[in-house]
Image (cartoon, rainbow, N blue to C red):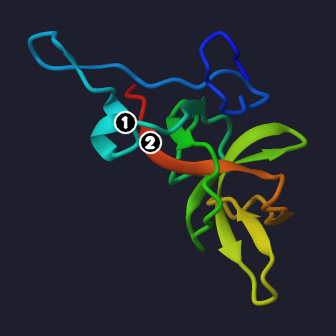
Amino acid sequence: MDDSTGDNREQPPWGDLCPIPHMDAEGRARPPLLALGGLENRLVSSLEVVGDAMHPDLRAGDLVVFVRHSGHLEDGGLYVLAGHAGLAPRRLQLLADGGWLAVPSNPCYGREPVDPRSGIVGPVVAVVRRTP
């Protein structure tokens, strides 16, 4: 908690999250980009995709924009997960027993069980594709 600002939201261990500024064609400031998507009061961040585990859906160098975990999980949804190798985007699959699997798009990589209480950082709300 940052007592100097009165902000009592818990800060995540990977750093500060902040709104992405947005301007119109004349260069005038507009609401932050994510406010346009109804996320103006949410802590957001972006993560650069590394490797090919999510290919062809995501490519190395793409940016995924995500919000902190809201508690609701969606079968097939794209989330940023925290694992032993750091943060990574994956789809979630709901199992018949109520458990969850982290599913890469690339079939060369295996599915892994994920603990929704500790392994899910939050849902991806946008993807920024890097152009060559």
Near mark 2 (Cα within 10 A), the count class, few <14, some 14-19 or many ≥20, is some
According to the image, label 2 marks what residue?
127
According to the image, label 1 marks what residue?
34
Residue 35 spot, x, y in % from top left = 33, 36
Residue 7 spot, x, y in % from top left = 61, 24
- Left or right, residue 38 beside residue 10: left
Q: Is residue 27 above or below residue 35?
A: above
**Closest to the observer: 132 or 69?**
69
Near mark 1 (Cα within 10 A), the count class, few <14, some 14-19 or many ≥20, is many
- Mark 1 and mark 2 lie on one chain; the one further toward the N terminus is 1
Q: Amino acid at mark 1?
A: Leu
**Which residue is the extreme one toward the bottom?**
96
Secondary structure at badge 2 equals strand
For the point 56% across and 64% down, the residue is: 77
Q: Amino acid at mark 2?
A: Val
Q: Is residue 43 above or below residue 3?
A: below
**Closest to the observer: 24 or 76?**
24
Q: Tell me where residue 112 sits by quadrant.
A: bottom right
For the point 42% across and 29% down, the residue is: 130
Q: Is residue 53 above or below residue 102?
A: above
User: Residue 81: which numbered mark, if any?
Assistant: none
For the point 75% across and 83% down, the residue is: 95
User: Mark 1 and 2 residues: CB-CB less than 8 Å, in contact?
Assistant: no
Which one is closest to the eye, mark 1 or mark 2? 1
Screen quadrant of the N terminus: top right
For the point 33% across and 26% down, the residue is: 32
Screen quadrant of the C terminus: top left
**Which residue is the extreme one toward the right?**
84
Residue 21 spot, x, y in % from top left = 35, 19
